[in-house]
Amino acid sequence: MTVINYQCPTYRDAYSRINAIVIEGEQEAHDNYIALTQLLPDRSEELHRLAKMEERHKKGFTACGKNLEVTPDMEYARQFFAALKQNFDDALRQGNLVTCLVIQALIVECFAIAAYNIYIPVADPFARKITEGVLKDEYLHLSFGEEWLKANFAQVKQDIEAANRQNLPLVWQMLNQVTADARTLGMEREELMADFMTQYSETLGNIGFTSREIMKMAAYGLA
């Protein structure tokens, strides 16, 4: 296994962007769960609890950057999430709960779980401990969306497929954008992609999609 120098300029430069991405991702997740109370007022207490978890995650990842004395490039991170955020905000304005859940509670959470799974083995000791704690919480967030969509599957199946067509291609674009920085941190794009698809496909299966349907859905944006 390659020994990583966490203090070398190349690592610190890449970390400034990757750290910013996870900080911004947790902030947007916090905001999204609060926003979802507009569409799911009966689940408001639970959504606020999920949002508070995301706020703690943001603080943890902010501490990771400070530990390495790296300033996160937050403007880069905001641009990184801009298209996905726009789609979530548009769906929220339209009252499209299914698309909001697919974006935040499926795609974003699966993306985060995959990234943290691959990052933990190569992280510095301080960040590893923080990330291991965050990872446990993310599975709870994934379960929230999964359970609601499963319970309403017959009514929302086509809406899930439409949200997938619109947003999954953005995931591949995002992975491509961070390939070089992720590799500098010891994370390979192929591993990130494989872990994401494992999490995402398993979740779609739990919701009610067949293996054939999942394969078709997974192909969007890959061509």
Image: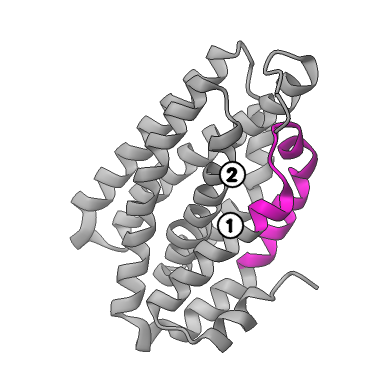
Q: Residues within 10 Å of mark 1 (few under 14, many from 20)?
A: many
Q: Residue at x 25, y 44 (%)?
A: 49
Q: Position of residue 9 (x, y in %)?
A: 78, 15
Question: Quarter holding the C terminus?
Answer: bottom right
Q: Secondary structure at mark 2?
A: helix
User: Looking at the magenta stretch, what is its main secondary structure?
Assistant: helix
Q: Position of residue 132 (x, y in %)?
A: 42, 36
Look at the image and give the residue range highlighted in magenta. Answer: 167-193
Q: Earlier in the sequence, mark 2 or mark 1?
A: 2
Viewer-proximal residue, 51 or 179? 179
The residue pinned by badge 2 equals 118
Total number of numbered labels? 2
Q: Position of residue 22 (x, y in %)?
A: 55, 36
Q: Amino acid at mark 1?
A: Asp
Asked whether 186 falls inside the magenta stretch, the response is: yes
Q: Residues within 10 Å of mark 2 (few under 14, many from 20)?
A: some
Mark 2 and mark 1 residues within 8 Å of each other at the beta carbon: yes
